[in-house]
Image (cartoon, rainbow, N blue to C red):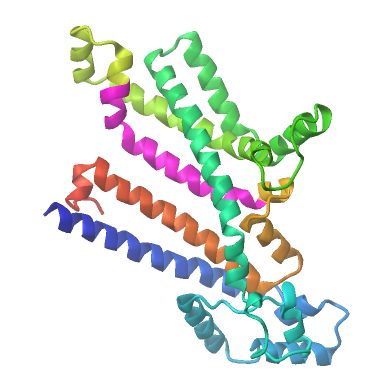
Amino acid sequence: MIASGRISYFLRRLLGSIVLLVIVLSVVFIANRQIGDPALMVLGVNATEEDVADMRERMGLNDPFLEQYGRFLKGMATGDLGSSFRYGVNTLVYTGAVSEEDAPDATATLPIAAERLPATLLLGGVTIAFSVFVALPLGIYAAVRPRKFGDRVVTVLSLAGVSIVEYWFALILILVFAIQVDWLPTSGYGTAAHLVLPVLALSLRPIGRIIQIARSSMLDELAKPYVTAARGRGIPVQKIASVHALKNAAIPIVTTIGDETATVVTGVIIIETVFGWPGIGALTVDALKIRDVPLIEATVFLLVVMVLTINLIVDLLYTVLSPRVRLGQQS
């Protein structure tokens, strides 16, 4: 019963994630063809009409829209999202220097984007781990000392975290720690020192949100009768909070951590560019600059897959934390 309910719940969530992936990427596909002529975007405004017409033919833009969309869906299902117009050696294909059959595999957009995936996963993973390590104890600390000085300090810090703009905070970090005191590098990749400033910039909002939800959830849980009974038996409130209340308050906290992880994944687009971090976010910005439509679609594809995977993992954690979910009683 429990196993079948868990499997049913997982399959529903997986199907919903696949449908949402198709919808998001379809919107991107349509938008890329509505904002301008992709062929002209590749060649630039100085291209001749003959060059643009030839490029449209090579890109299949003269085919009916439904045929183009069908190729896109097929490519999405098979992992073939096309070749980059300007990235790497694929320029040779569209200038006619080599045939498409002879073009190296390195021009395919999905492998290009996938090469940047480890850097983004590293930055995002360290950011969330650091955020949870800092925020969860502070949220619990504030909950067991409500309306006291420590609680007020933590509350102010959490409000600051969710209010400060990441991009502005990143520039301040560079100005202070990389330029004025010269403790850390301004940009780059490869050492622990390169991680510090991007992680601090990205973790500001997750720390603030996790503190707020952890404090609120723990306050609700600590007000329940079983906690009052436990305190009446002389059990320290810190032990009650860390051993019993935290487990019962875990679902909203886990949900927030999942939401903030997804936010971090999308937030890397700006932060990676600021700090010169070679991840998918920076690649997305580069693709937008050179108007490489297939590469834009590939980077968005990976970003959306990461976000949906995070949400699916959170949903699976519900089956561990909540008996109702295990039995398939939640939609």
Residue at 71% x, 51% y: name it: 273
- Identify whether 302 is placed above or below 194: below
Q: Which quarter of the figure has residue 230?
A: top left
Q: Give the x, y percent position of residue 97.
A: 78, 89
Q: Nearer the viewer, residue 170 or 224?
A: 170
- Identify whether 95 is placed above or below 243: below
Residue at 25% x, 47% y: name it: 319
Q: Which quarter of the figure has residue 203?
A: top right
Q: Quadrant of the N terminus?
A: bottom left
Magenta span includes 255? yes
Most common secondary structure along the magenta stretch: helix
Residue 267 placement, left or right of 10: right
Residue at the far front in the pictured view: 191
Residue 69 placement, left or right of 47: left
Q: How many badges with numbers are in the image?
A: 0
Residue at 58% x, 74% y: name it: 30
Note whether residue 86 is visible. no
- Identify whether 312 is placed above or below 201: below
Q: Give the x, y percent position of residue 183.
A: 76, 30
The part of the chain drawn in magenta is 242-269
Q: Give the x, y percent position of residue 141.
A: 42, 18
Note whether residue 109 is visible. yes
Residue 239 placement, left or right of 208: left
Residue at the far right in the pictured view: 46
Q: Quadrant of the C terminus?
A: bottom left
Magenta span includes 263? yes
Q: Give the x, y percent position of residue 138.
A: 47, 22
